[in-house]
Structure formats: C-alpha cells, structure tokens
Amino acid sequence: MRKILTSLILLGAGVWVGWCASQAVPRRSAAPRAVMPRGPLPAAEQSVVDRFKEARVSVVYLTSLAYQQDFWSLDVQTVPTGTGSGFVWDAEGHLVTNYHVIEGAEVVEAALSDGTRRKARVVGVAPEKDLAVLRIETNGLRLRPIPVGSSADLQVGQSVMAIGNPFGLDQTMTTGVVSALGREIQSATRRRISGVIQTDAAINPGNSGGPLLDSAGRLIGVNTAIQSTSGSSAGIGFAVPVDTVNRVVPQLIARGHSARADLGFDPIPDAWAASLDVPKGIIVGRVRRGGPADGQVVKDMDKLLDLVETEKPGSVVTLEVYRQGKKTKLQLTVAVDSSG
C-alpha cells in the first residue's frame, strides 16, 4: 500500500512539474540597455565638484588618543577617545580644529587626504573661541593651505559647503546656505562666541573642526556645533566666523594662547547686577591698582571683551561710565593679559 501511495505521489509531482514547464514563458535574449550620454554638468554643479576637489586635499581627519594601561600585563597602549576634522593652515604644518575635538587628548593623530598619518602636537588653544592649532612634521609632505576668505561681508542665502569626517566617514561634503548671521553659542569656558554663522549644510558628529567654505572655495568658518535633540544634524549648524579664526590662530601659533584684552577692572557678576537699579551696561566692581582703568553700550562682559579684543594692544578706547549717578567718559589704553 505504501509503495502504491509513494508511486502516486511521485507521479503527481512529475505531472505538476511538466504542467508548470508547459506554462513557462519562452526564454528570450536580453542585453544591457544603451547608456544615454549625459553631457556636461551644469555650471553650478561643476563649480561645486571643482571646489570639493580643490579643498579636500586641505582637510584632515583627526583622532584623539589617550594612554591606557592593561590591568594584567601593565602594558601601555593608546586607545581612541574621539574623532573630528581639521584643515591645513600653512605650509609649516599647522592645522586648525576645534578645541573640543582635542580637549583632554594625550596624543592626536592626523590623517591627510592621501592616507598619510602623522602625530600632531598641540601648539596652542583658545577654549573661549573653541579653536586649537596643531602641528605635524612636514618632511616628505606637500601641504596645501586652505584659501582664507572673509565673514564680515557674508549674506544670508549664500551657498556654502562643509567638508569633514562625520561618523568617521572621511572626505564627506554637504552643501547648503548661510541660514543666519550674528548667532551666539557657548564655548567650553562658558563664554559666548559671538558673530557665529548658522547654516543648514548638514553638520554631524565628526564634522567639528572642519572648514565651512563659500562658493569660491574660500574658508568662511570652522564648523563647531549643531543644535539637535538627537545629536545628529537637524538643519541647524554653527561655525566660528573666519574673521575670528584669522585673528586668533596667528596668536596661538606665536604664543600658544590668544591675547586677552585687559581694561584693568573686574565687573560685578551679571546675576548681581540684574538686581541693581542702574542703567544697562557693565557694572565696575573693582578697579585694579596699576591697571589701565581706575563706549559703546554693551549688555554684558562677553560683549565688552569681544569689542576690546578687536582692538590692537596699545589702542585707546573710550568707555562711557556712570559714577555716583553721573555719566562720564574715560579713555583707556588696551593692554594684553599675558598671564595665560
């Protein structure tokens, strides 16, 4: 009985396969479709492509490393603690990035666009501007400094390009526009960075320290932060303006820190000043003996320092102050705080 059933099943399967074969679509010869010539890229697209090719060789991939000792073998090794971006500032091997990219790093490794890797030494930092300068040895390298532009004449709506290494994916470019100007963000020292550029070009973790370029391929800012609840780009990114970068970086190369203006007085903390019935401005709490002090209306100390830092040491500035209920003007000489 089992043999009969098995034979019937096999016979039925054979009939089914035969029927399916008879219903199959006849095979036909096929070949790839002809490729339609694309033609030249539109001028606007070609310009973006060209600017990327020119700028990518100036962008570096930074890895922050820390020393770690194995618990059992006591061997010391370096382990990655973070990644970010940077760019070539000059032919002497100076690289610019964000301070928060290399903060706390014991070793920094720079990977150039051609894959060359070099240890980078920290030359100077300006935490209050979220900027840092590194230096690599240039022997055997042909470095191309990134062209520097201006941020003073930027306009909302201008096209921009951001190049960096988001999520460790090096040589990534995103495009967008200048969304707003004159923004303020907080630095690692909690001092506000003013004049910040806002852009909708996607800036993600790892883009920090990379260049923000205009449509001519010139540096107009250093990508530094995003505003997002998830930590990924939400269309609001910020960049330190290049005019600030071009002022601070030479100071970091020359002395290891930025020149901090000193007017010779200490202000009353903002929280205290808010409770006093006085005109809006900076309230002088103590004039330092021997300092330059015993203008322009400013709302807080950060704004005052931003204004004074644009002046050269030795310049004379005029402050309009209230003293014992009377308004008067003081002319002070800008000094440089060399304690840092």
Image (tube, rainbow, N blue to C red):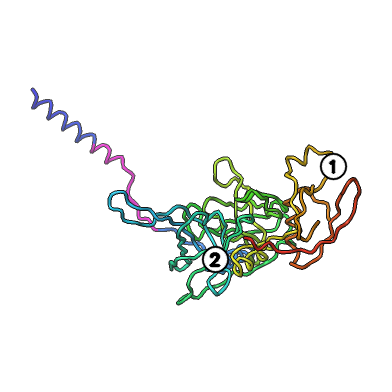
Left or right of 217? Residue 32 is: left
Mark closer to the observer (2, 1): 1
User: Is 80 rendered above or below residue 259?
Assistant: above
Look at mark 2 in the image and give the residue it sits on. Answer: 123
Identity, as a three-letter code, of the amino acid under mark 1: Val
Tell which circle, 2 or 1, labels the residue nearer the N-terminal end: 2
Choose between 334 and 205: the one closer to the eye.
334
Q: Secondary structure at mark 1?
A: loop
Choose between 312 and 198: the one closer to the eye.
312
Look at mark 1 in the image and give the residue it sits on. Answer: 278
Image point (31%, 39%), residue name? 23
As drawn, the residue found furthest toward the top would be 1
Identity, as a three-letter code, of the amino acid under mark 2: Val
Choose between 168 and 158: the one closer to the eye.
168
For the magenta stretch, what is the residue range? Answer: 17-31
Marks 2 and 1 sit apart, C-alpha to C-alpha, by: 44 Å
Quadrant where the N terminus lies? top left
Counting from the top left corner in percent of width and height, residue 265 is at: 76, 54
Residue 23 is a magenta residue: yes
Q: Are marks 2 and 1 in contact (CB under 8 Å)?
A: no
Left or right of 105? Residue 259 is: right
Choose between 208 and 20: the one closer to the eye.
208
